[in-house]
Amino acid sequence: MLVATGAAPYSTLAEFVAYAKANPGKVNFGSPGPGTAQHLAGEMFQAAAGIKLTHVPYKSGSSQMTDMMSGILDVSFDYLTVLRPLIDTGKVKVLGTTGTARLAALPDAPTVLEAGYPDAVSVGSTWVSVPAGTDPRIVGKLSEALAAVLADPGIVADLATNGQVSIANKGLAEMGPFIVEETARYKRVIESAGIAAH
């Protein structure tokens, strides 16, 4: 999601984009380092919105959040699990989320898709994999076990509270193409933004 300092002169995605367009390169955004998911989300958003932001990489998310609270950073892209305490105490304000659907945990926060920036959708994903050639029976049992865990009401509630969405609906047939597509999409972002390996 995209958050701004509490004192920022913008409170919506539209206001932020208008401000950034009026102040090209003067608005900065932090990330826990070059090439991180948060950095890529920022690159995707500025490309989609036609704005120029200045990236400020940190070596840790905690340093980034400290500077966010002190006003050194203007905005940051990060996960709800990191930002929740700052949101709840009013130290940062949510401008929007980078998903395709509103989060149950923040139903009033619009998505970049709603704001008209489909190319800014950036959703991190986690999956479990095994070595190629693993016995299909073992793969099947693992898939069934993971699906059962992700269907557990406690897990479902925890995911929702932390702004996460289960992709358990993607079975074995869907995961391969999904990973290939996501990898290619983020590779294009990395190349377009000229992000070098460190």
Image (cartoon, rainbow, N blue to C red):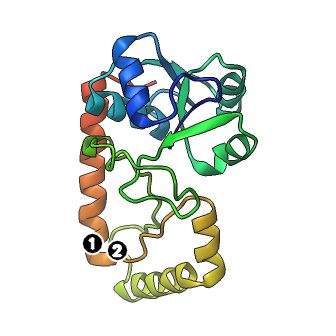
Above or below residue 163? Residue 115 is: above
Q: Is residue 159 left or right of residue 49?
A: right
Amino acid type, label 2: Lys
Residue 154: % across, % down:
66, 79
Kind of residue sitting beneath label 1:
Glu
Q: CA distance from mark 2 to mark 1?
A: 5 Å
Circle 1: element type:
helix
For disc 1, the neighbor class at 10 Å (few under 14, some 14 to 19, many from 20) is few
Q: Are marks 2 and 1 in contact (CB under 8 Å)?
A: yes
> Is residue 82 shown above or below 8?
below
Question: SS for tag 2?
Answer: loop
Q: Nearer the viewer, residue 20 or 9?
A: 9
Residue under label 2:
170
**Residue 90 found in image quarter:** top right
Task: Please name the residue shown 65% across and 45% down the image.
Answer: 82
Answer whether residue 24 is visible to the viewer in this image.
Answer: no
As drawn, the label of residue 115 is none
Residue where numbered disc 1 is placed? 174
Residue placed at 38% from the left, 33% from the top?
Answer: 14
Residue under the point 27% across and 43% down: 116
